[in-house]
Image (cartoon, rainbow, N blue to C red):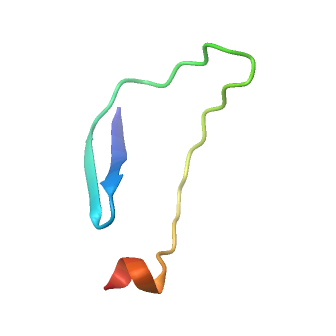
Amino acid sequence: MRAAIYYGLRSIEVGAHPDPVITAPTDAIVCVVLSCGTKEMRR
């Protein structure tokens, strides 16, 4: 699947990533469809 991968401040790339798998009862899969940046991210 394609995913936004966060490497650090001002370093976000879209690339291939394996499909998520739930392996423990406390695991969760979250789909973020919209994100608003802060003033720090817009510099």
Left or right of residue 26: residue 13: left
Residue 16 in which image quadrant: top left
Residue occupying image coordinates x 60% and y 41% = 30
Above or below, comparing residue 7 to residue 21 in the picture: below
Above or below, comparing residue 41 to residue 19 in the picture: below
Residue 2 image position (x, y, % from top left)? 32, 39
Residue occupying image coordinates x 73% and y 24% = 26
Residue 19 image position (x, y, % from top left)? 43, 24
Q: Quadrant of the C terminus?
A: bottom left
Residue 42 in which image quadrant: bottom left
Residue occupying image coordinates x 53% and y 64% = 34
Q: Quadrant of the N terminus?
A: top left
Above or below, comparing residue 24 to residue 14 in the picture: above
Residue placed most toward the observer, 13 or 7? 7
Outermost residue to the top? 23
Residue 15 image position (x, y, % from top left)? 25, 41
Residue placed most toward the observer, 31 or 9? 9
Left or right of residue 39: residue 4: left
How many numbered marks does the figure carry? 0
Residue occupying image coordinates x 51% and y 74% = 36
